[in-house]
C-alpha cells in the first residue's frame, strides 16, 4: 500500500494559510495592501477583541468586478503580475495572489464591493474556502471586507494567539506602518468602538509622523533629503539627544513598502557613532527610492524582508543621507522657557486684592495720567516688588563700578491702597544641587527646528571609506560675535556670553570631544612616550591572549607593551596625549575591545579606544582651570560642527537667549 498521498484541498489550503495568516494583524496587512494597490484615498480599519472575532477594512478604491469575485479567492489569482519578467519590477505591495485564499480558508468572510461605473455592487460570502452567497447588492464605491471568527475551524491555532490587547497592538502597528508609508491616504483605526488613529491624508510626511507618534517625537526630528549614486533618501531622523532605548522606532520604507533591513539599520547607527549615548538607538522615518530591478521583494512570505543587489551601496546611501542631515540641522541646544505665567498678580507682587477697587500696577500706570493724593498724610512705602526667584548658577564678582546697589523703584499704586500694603521679607533665591544641575544639563530640551533656508553642503566626498565631511556656508557680511568666558559654575560648567546669548559648556565633555577629534584627524597625537620603568598590568587570561595576538596593532595606537608571564603585560610606552595617567585601566579597556571585536575590530575597536584615551586625557569636572584655559577651549569648540556631543553622546553646549532671560525677570512680556 502506498504511503505517499496527495493531500486534500481542505488540508492543503489550511497548511498554506498557516504560512501567510498567523494572527489578525496578518489579515489586516494583506487587506490594507490590497486597498492601497486599488488606489484608495480613504481607508478605515475596525477591530473587536483584538481582531479575533471581528475585523473590517473599508476603502474607496476601484472595487472588484462581480465576475472576478469568485476568482479573487482562488490561490495564485492576481491582477498585479502576469509573467516572470514582472517579478523584476514590482511596484505594488501585494502580488502573490495568496492573501484572500488564505484568509477565507481560516475565517468567515463577507465582501461588499462596487466599481464606480457599475449600477450595483456585489455581496459575496465565503467561509472556510466554500462559497455561501454571491448576489447583487447596493453599496458605496470601493470595497469592504468583514472577517469574523478567525481560526474558527482550527481551534488549535486559537490557543497560540495572545491576549486581545496584544493582538490589537499588532494590528495597530501594521496600520501605523501603512500610514507612514502612504501619507497621501487618510487612515482611520477603530479598536473596540474607539478611534485610536486618524491621519489627514494630505501627502505630507511630517503630518503622517505627527499623527502616528505625536508632537514630542515629531519635534525631535530633523529632515533628511539626499541622493547618492541613483538612490534617493528622504524623510526624518531623530536628534541624538532624543534617541530611544530600542530599535522599534527605526522605520525604513523601500519604494513605499515597509521593510526590515540589517544594512539600513547598521548604516543609520554608524551615522550616529560618537554622538549617541551607550544603550541608546537612533529613530527614523526614512523613505528609500530605488530602481525596482535592484531590489528583490519576493524573499519572504510576508514581504517584510527584501534583498538588495548591492548591500554596500545601500549602506553608503543611508549613512551619507543621515550624516548630512545631522550636520546640517542638528544645532547646539538652546534653553526655551514656556511663555505662560506661573503666578497670579497677587502672588507675584504680594498685593492684597480688594474687590471694590481696581488695582493698577506700574506697567499700567505708565499709560495713565498721574493721580492726586487723597489726603495730606504721607502713605507708607509699598513693599519691594519681587520677581520669581531664578536659579543661582554662579557668583562672578562684579567690577568696582558695578558694585553700587541699584534702588528698586516701587510700583505706583493708588494712594488709598498703598497705605494698606505691608512689607514682607524678601524671597530667597532658589538653590540647586550639583546633581540637579547635571540632570538639568543632560535633559535639556531642544529648540524648534529653524526653517530658514541656508545653502549647506556637508558631504561632498565620493569615497565611502574616507567619510570626509566639508561645509560650504554662504559668507555673511556682518562679523560674528565671539564667545567670552564670564566664569565657571561648580568647577564643571563654563558660563560664557556670545552676542545676545548665554552659553553653558560642559568643560569635560567639550575637552573630551576636542581630543577625540584631534586623535582621529592626526594620528601623530598617538606617538608613544617611553616610560622610565615599565608598568606591570595584570589582566584576565582572555585579555592577555587578546593583547598578545595584537601587539602590532596596539603599537599603532601609541602603546608599547610586551607580554610577560601570563596573565601580566609590561607597558613600556603610552601615547603622549595620556600624560601622567595610569595606563592600567586603558590597557584593560583595550583588551576588552579586542575580545568584543574579533571579526572586524578596525572601526569599533579604534573608536572605542579613542573614547577611552580622550576621556582619560581631558579636563575633569571639579579640576581647577584658569579663565585663559577655558577661553581657549571655548574658542576651539564653539564654531566646530564636529563638536556638539561628547563621544558618549552628552551635549557639549547649551544656549539661553537674552530675550528668554529678560522674560524670566519680567523685563519683557
Image: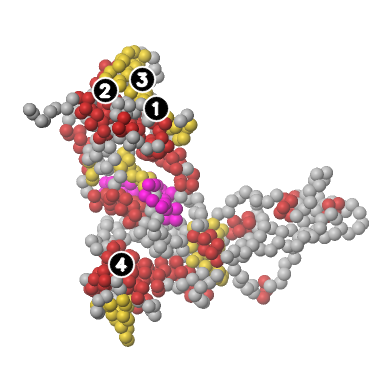
Q: Quadrant of residue 75?
A: top left
Query: Counting other residues with Cα less than 10 Å from the Cα at mark 3, is it few (<14), some (14-19), or many (20 or more)?
Result: many
Element class at badge 3 = strand
Q: Position of residue 590 (x, y in %)?
A: 31, 70
Q: Earlier in the sequence, mark 3 or mark 4?
A: 3
Give the residue number, with chain letter if any, for mark 1. 54
Judged from this view, the residue extending furthest toward the bottom is 532
Q: Quadrant of the N terminus?
A: top left
Element class at badge 1 = strand
Depth check: 249 or 14 in front? 14
Residue at point 38%, 51% (across, down): 246
Residue 18 appears in the rendering: yes
Q: In front of the other: label 3 or label 2?
A: 2
Give the residue number, with chain letter if any, for mark 2. 129
Give the residue number, with chain letter if any, for mark 4. 592
**Magenta-colored span:** 221-249
Determine the CA span between mark 4 and mark 2: 59 Å
Give the residue number, with chain letter if any, for mark 3. 112
Residue 330 appears in the rendering: no
Q: Position of residue 138 (x, y in %)?
A: 39, 14
Query: Counting other residues with Cα less than 10 Å from the Cα at mark 2, is it few (<14), some (14-19), or many (20 or more)?
Result: many
Q: Earlier in the sequence, mark 4 or mark 1?
A: 1
Depth check: 591 or 529 in front? 591
Judged from this view, the residue extending furthest toward the front is 1
Judged from this view, the residue extending furthest toward the right is 376
Q: Position of residue 329 (x, y in %)?
A: 43, 53
Residue at point 32%, 40% (across, down): 258
**Proximity of marks 3 and 2: CB atoms separated by less than 8 Å:** no
Residue at point 51%, 73% (across, down): 622
Query: Does 314 sit left or right of 655 as displayed?
Result: left
Q: Earlier in the sequence, mark 4 or mark 2?
A: 2
Amino acid at each position: 500500500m502506498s504511503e505517499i498521498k496527495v493531500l486534500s484541498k481542505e488540508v492543503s489550503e489550511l497548511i498554506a494559510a498557516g504560512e501567510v495568516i498567523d494572527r489578525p494583524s496578518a489579515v489586516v496587512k494583506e487587506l490594507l495592501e490590497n486597498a492601497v494597490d486599488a488606489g484608495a484615498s480613504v481607508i478605515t480599519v475596525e477591530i473587536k477583541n483584538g481582531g479575533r472575532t471581528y475585523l473590517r477594512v473599508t476603502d474607496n478604491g476601484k472595487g472588484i468586478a462581480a465576475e472576478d469575485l469568485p476568482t479573487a479567492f482562488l490561490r495564485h489569482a492576481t491582477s498585479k503580475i502576469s509573467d516572470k519578467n514582472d517579478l523584476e519590477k514590482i511596484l505594488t505591495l501585494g502580488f502573490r495572489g495568496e492573501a484572500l485564499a488564505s484568509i477565507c480558508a481560516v475565517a468567515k468572510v463577507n465582501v461588499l464591493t462596487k466599481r464606480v461605473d457599475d449600477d450595483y455592487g456585489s455581496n459575496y460570502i465565503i467561509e472556510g474556502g466554500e462559497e455561501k452567497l454571491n448576489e447583487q447588492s447596493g453599496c458605496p464605491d470601493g470595497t469592504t471586507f468583514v472577517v469574523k471568527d478567525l481560526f474558527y475551524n482550527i481551534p488549535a491555532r486559537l490557543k497560540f494567539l495572545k491576549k486581545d490587547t496584544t493582538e490589537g497592538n499588532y494590528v495597530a502597528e501594521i496600520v501605523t506602518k501603512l500610514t507612514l508609508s502612504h501619507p497621501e491616504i487618510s487612515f482611520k483605526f477603530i479598536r473596540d468602538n474607539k478611534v485610536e488613529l486618524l491621519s489627514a491624508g494630505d501627502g505630507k510626511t511630517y503630518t503622517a509622523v505627527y499623527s502616528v507618534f505625536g508632537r514630542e517625537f515629531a519635534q525631535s526630528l530633523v529632515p533628511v533629503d539626499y541622493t547618492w549614486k541613483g538612490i534617493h533618501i528622504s524623510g526624518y531622523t531623530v536628534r541624538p539627544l532624543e534617541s530611544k532605548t530600542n530599535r522599534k522606532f527605526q522605520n525604513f520604507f523601500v519604494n513605499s513598502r515597509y521593510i526590515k533591513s540589517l544594512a539600513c539599520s547598521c548604516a543609520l547607527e554608524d551615522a550616529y557613532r560618537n554622538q549617541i549615548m551607550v544603550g541608546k538607538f537612533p529613530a527614523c522615518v526614512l523613505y528609500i527610492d530605488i530602481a525596482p530591478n535592484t531590489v528583490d521583494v519576493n524573499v519572504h512570505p510576508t514581504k517584510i524582508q527584501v534583498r538588495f543587489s548591492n548591500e554596500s551601496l545601500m549602506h553608503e546611501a543611508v549613512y551619507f543621507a543621515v550624516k548630512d542631515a545631522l550636520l546640517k540641522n542638528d544645532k547646539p541646544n538652546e534653553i526655551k522657557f514656556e511663555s505662560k505665567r506661573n503666578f497670579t498678580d497677587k502672588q507675584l507682587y504680594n498685593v492684597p486684592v480688594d474687590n471694590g477697587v481696581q488695582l493698577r500696577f506700574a506697567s499700567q500706570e505708565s499709560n495713565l495720567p498721574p493721580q492726586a493724593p487723597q489726603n495730606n498724610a504721607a502713605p507708607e512705602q509699598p513693599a519691594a516688588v519681587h520677581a520669581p526667584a531664578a536659579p543661582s548658577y554662579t557668583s562672578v564678582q562684579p567690577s568696582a563700578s558695578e558694585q553700587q546697589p541699584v534702588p528698586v523703584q516701587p510700583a505706583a499704586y493708588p494712594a488709598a491702597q498703598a497705605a494698606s500694603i505691608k512689607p514682607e521679607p524678601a524671597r530667597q533665591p532658589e538653590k540647586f544641587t550639583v546633581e540637579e544641575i547635571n540632570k538639568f544639563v543632560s535633559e535639556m530640551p531642544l529648540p524648534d527646528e529653524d526653517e530658514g533656508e541656508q545653502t549647506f553642503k556637508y558631504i561632498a566626498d565620493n569615497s565611502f571609506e574616507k567619510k570626509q565631511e566639508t561645509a560650504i556656508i554662504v559668507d555673511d557680511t556682518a562679523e560674528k560675535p565671539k564667545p567670552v568666558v564670564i566664569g565657571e559654575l561648580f568647577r564643571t560648567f563654563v558660563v560664557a556670553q556670545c552676542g545676545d546669548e548665554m552659553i553653558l559648556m560642559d568643560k569635560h565633555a567639550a575637552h573630551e570631544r576636542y581630543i577625540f577629534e584631534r586623535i582621529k584627524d592626526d594620528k601623530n597625537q598617538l606617538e608613544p612616550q617611553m616610560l622610565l620603568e615599565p608598568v606591570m598590568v595584570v589582566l584576565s587570561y582572555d585579555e592577555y591572549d587578546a593583547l598578545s595576538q595584537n601587539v602590532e596593532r596596539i603599537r599603532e595606537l601609541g602603546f608599547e607593551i610586551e607580554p610577560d608571564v601570563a596573565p601580566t603585560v609590561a607597558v613600556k610606552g603610552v601615547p603622549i596625549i595620556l600624560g601622567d595617567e595610569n595606563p592600567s585601566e586603558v590597557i584593560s579597556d583595550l583588551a576588552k575591545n579586542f575580545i568584543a571585536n574579533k571579526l572586524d575590530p578596525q572601526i569599533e575597536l579604534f573608536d572605542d579606544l579613542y573614547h577611552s584615551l580622550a576621556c582619560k586625557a581631558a579636563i575633569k569636572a571639579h579640576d581647577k582651570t584658569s579663565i585663559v584655559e577655558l577661553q581657549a577651549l571655548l574658542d576651539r569648540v564653539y564654531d566646530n560642527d564636529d563638536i556638539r556631543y561628547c563621544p558618549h553622546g552628552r551635549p557639549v553646549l547649551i544656549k539661553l537667549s537674552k530675550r528668554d532671560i529678560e522674560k524670566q525677570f519680567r523685563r519683557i512680556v
